[in-house]
Amino acid sequence: MFKKILLAVTPQIDTQTAPRAAFELARSRNAEVVLFHSLPLERDAWCCFDDQTDRDRLLAATEAKIAEFYKDDLKDIRHSIRVSTGNAHERMLKIIHAEDIDLIVMGHHTQPPHRADRMWGVVDTTIRKVCANVFCPVMVVTNPVPAGARIKRIVMATDFSTPSDSALCYAVQMASSFGAHLDIFHVLDVGQVTPNPAYYMQSMQVFIDKAVGRMQSRYARALEGVSHEFHCWEGVPYVEILKQARWQEADMVIMAQYSSSEDHAKPSVGSTTIQVALSPGCPSVLVNYRARTCI
């Protein structure tokens, strides 16, 4: 399923969960990995700007350091290293669109960064800009992935929106490719600040049964031949998705990058997808809308 994976790299030791996951995935799928890093105009962890040097020499030195840093991991993986200068997301997007990248792997930063724009959750972060401009999914890895780990169980969160339907098609493709079990999950959003009065007018089980029936009728065709279950209960969406993934011992969570309840032009740090992706747990795959016809 994956032929070319783009990995955004950093030398910060406690953020190496994303590279490890990308390398394991590449080995299991015989995929090529493109390691990417963009040098800013300020200080960067891959290089030192104390001494003046020309651009080509700086790029070559940084590429050599990246190769040395990951040499043990890359010796049995097809790979290339791309180092650029300037705006990180713009440089990354050029590679993604030009080379048919089919998965982007990124990790959050657990050490205080030198620059605020390296942090998840800050407005206009690189990852937000990348997610807003690509068709291929973005996998965010926060916790270590065991060596040789297989994808055996996937949780797919849906809110019945068109982007969620597209993400469901992608999840079915993933489950089929890896022979994994798929848990389709819907949360009845009771609201964090303003409770939804509809849920207090009759038994919650009525709403749960209705949502499960809707999933069964909506996704039956797409799920033929795929091991799956439907789940639904009430709560705060990102909290319940994290619970479901933990209880099911999921290897991956798949969500639409945009949902019907969020401003498509301004994906916020408070969105369900970002809150799930930021939280410690199994890797989260954020899927941008793309016309898919499995339903």
Image: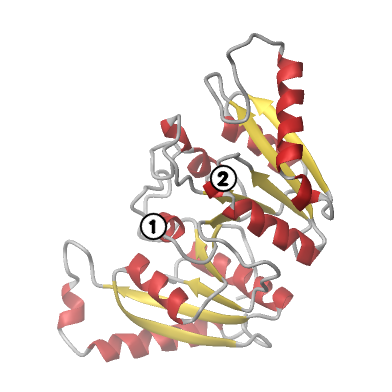
Measured in 3D between alpha carbons, the distance from the residue under mark 2 to the one under mark 1, in whole angstroms, is 23 Å
In the rendered view, would you say 121 is above or below 43?
Answer: below
Write the residue at 42% across / 87% down.
212
Residue at 68% in and 27% down: 84
The tag on residue 275 is: 1
Q: Where is residue 168 in the image (x, y as percent from the top left)?
A: 56, 71
Of 211 and 123, nearer the camera is: 123
User: Relative to 267, is 179 above or below?
Assistant: below
For mark 1, give the secondary structure: helix
The reply, left or right, for residue 42 in relation to residue 264 is right
Position of the C terminus, as image quadrant, is: bottom right
Q: Which colour scheme is used?
A: secondary structure
Residue at (15% x, 81% y) in the render: 200
Q: Residue 74 location, x and y as percent?
A: 79, 50
Whether residue 288 is visible to the viewer of this picture, yes or no, is no
Residue sticking out furthest to the top: 52
Residue 160, percent across and down? 44, 71
At 51% from the left and 38% from the top, the residue drawn is 126
Measuring from the top left, give residue 252's x and y in whole percent: 56, 69
Q: How many C-alpha atoms fall within 10 Å of the one at disc 1: few (<14), some, or many (≥20)? A: some
Nearest to N terminus: mark 2 or mark 1: 2
Callout 1 amino acid: Gln
Q: What element carries label 2?
A: helix
Quarter of image, res 241: bottom left
Can the viewer see residue 243? yes
Residue type pointed to by label 2:
Ile
Q: Mark 2 points at which residue?
A: 13
Question: In what quadrant of the picture does the N terminus appear?
Answer: bottom right
